[in-house]
Image (spheres, helix red, strand yellow):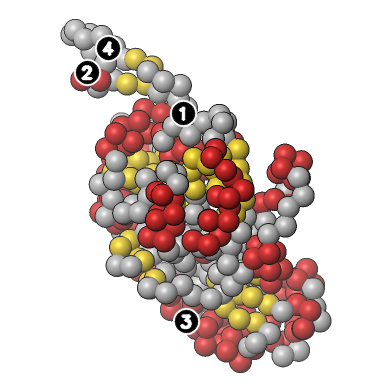
């Protein structure tokens, strides 16, 4: 891949990040040490959440949140059809089943009306809903919560795209309208740890439960042990858990990156604004996704809506032509019910909003290290390929 190639997303690593990792490598701790605690403390501040529990990736964050809330066999989780595989898979990891919820065709987001419709299909087995802040835009959590609480549902926000986003004056992850929120630190996300995840919550009991579950269900704190005494080696496995711990190496990188969250957000917002301005000349054939109200978004992705039938080019043809011009793109996402596993499990499904969103969406390059002029290059290439 040439130096001039623009991927749809990539990490931005600075000398401070490298130094932070090297410091850990020179220390006595490579995992389950002070770097993890430092990162959790900083993340609580960034999200205004009382509790933040680091873990190995965004998928395990989802699994831990649902398991900590007691989601299990016989339960149904409502998941938007437009999201990554992990959102639904985490429910199945707990022994639950999934009902796919439709989304708005112009934003890809779950709405109050979509949740109400999905609840009708889920019936009285519905136990949780997992709204997804797709691309970094925020779901209206107050509206979702009002329906969820009336139906006695647990609410877990999949915020893996939305670190740095502020909605209705609150950072995503503050959990004022949910039981928990989950984050990912995959390299293409806003901050990178290589791999890494986090669960935030306002519930102290849930936080304690997740802390045990991420480390084999093991408890060492004397006040929580069944057996007392003065045996400093003693520990107890009080429930079935997993090895979902984050290493200090990863935590040091993520903590260093988190210091630049505001810088990353400004860069992404400036690039998104330049895309918005340049794409105005290609409307209505190409439009940015519709922006959600009362949201100061830190966009993880820059998806556009393209009327492929009107422009007379297929999405595959466009992606290949752009790649030949050194521009990478991606589709976020294929509706989950189209996946062979879920189609075989739940049968043939088609949700109108999800189908219309999927048919038009394409994610253009967006990351903090992208050159300020790159959006013009991308839009010019789009215009050339599509003859607009």
- Mark 2 and mark 4 in contact? Answer it, CB < 8 Å: no
**Badge number at residue 226:** 4
Circle 4: element type: loop
- Residue at 37% x, 18% y is 238
The image shows residue 288 at horizontal and vertical percentages of 57, 78
The image shows residue 328 at horizontal and vertical percentages of 66, 68
Mark pair 4, 3: CA separation? 57 Å
Q: Residues within 10 Å of mark 4 (few under 14, many from 20)?
A: few
**Residue 320, quarter of the rendered image:** bottom right
Residue 141 or residue 380, whichever sits in front: 141
Mark pair 3, 1: CA separation? 42 Å
Q: Earlier in the sequence, mark 2 or mark 1?
A: 2
Position of residue 206 relative to residue 307, above or below, is above
Circle 3: element type: helix
Q: Which residue is mark 2?
A: 222
Circle 2: element type: helix
Q: Which residue is mark 3?
A: 273
Position of residue 292 relative to residue 159, above or below, is below
């Amino acid at each position: 891949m040439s130096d001039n190639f623009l991927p749809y997303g990539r990490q931005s690593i600075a000398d401070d990040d490298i130094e932070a990792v090297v410091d850990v490598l020179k220390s006595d701790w490579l995992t389950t040490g002070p770097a993890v605690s430092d990162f959790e403390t900083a993340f609580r501040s960034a999200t205004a959440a009382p509790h933040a529990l680091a873990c190995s990736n965004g998928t395990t964050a989802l699994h831990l949140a649902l398991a900590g809330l007691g989601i299990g066999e016989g339960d149904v989780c409502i998941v938007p059809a437009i999201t990554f595989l992990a959102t639904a898979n985490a429910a199945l990891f707990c022994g639950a089943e999934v009902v796919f919820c439709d989304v708005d065709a112009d934003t890809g987001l779950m709405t109050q009306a979509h949740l109400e419709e999905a609840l009708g299909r889920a019936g009285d087995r519905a136990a949780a809903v997992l709204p997804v802040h797709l691309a970094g835009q925020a779901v209206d959590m107050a509206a979702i919560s009002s329906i969820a609480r009336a139906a006695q549902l647990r609410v877990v926000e999949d915020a893996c795209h939305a670190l740095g986003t502020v909605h209705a004056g609150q950072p995503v992850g503050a959990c004022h309208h949910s039981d928990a929120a989950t984050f990912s630190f995959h390299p293409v996300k806003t901050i990178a740890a290589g791999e890494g995840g986090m669960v935030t919550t306002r519930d102290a009991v849930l936080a304690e439960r997740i802390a045990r579950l991420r480390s084999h269900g093991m408890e060492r704190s004397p006040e929580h042990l069944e057996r007392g005494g003065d045996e400093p080696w003693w520990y107890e496995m009080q429930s079935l858990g997993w090895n979902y711990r984050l290493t200090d190496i990863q935590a040091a990188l993520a903590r260093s990156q988190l210091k630049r969250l505001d810088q990353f957000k400004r860069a992404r917002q400036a690039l998104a604004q330049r895309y918005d301005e340049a794409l105005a000349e290609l409307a209505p054939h190409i439009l940015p996704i519709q922006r959600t109200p009362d949201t100061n978004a830190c966009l993880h992705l820059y998806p556009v809506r393209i009327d492929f039938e009107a422009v007379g080019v297929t999405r595959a043809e466009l992606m290949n032509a752009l790649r030949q011009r050194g521009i990478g793109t991606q589709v976020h996402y294929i509706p989950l019910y189209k996946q062979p596993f879920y189609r075989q499990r739940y049968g043939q499904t088609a949700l109108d909003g999800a189908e219309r969103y999927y048919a038009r969406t394409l994610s253009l390059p967006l990351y903090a290290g992208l050159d300020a002029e790159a959006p013009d290059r991308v839009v010019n290439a789009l215009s050339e390929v599509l003859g607009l």
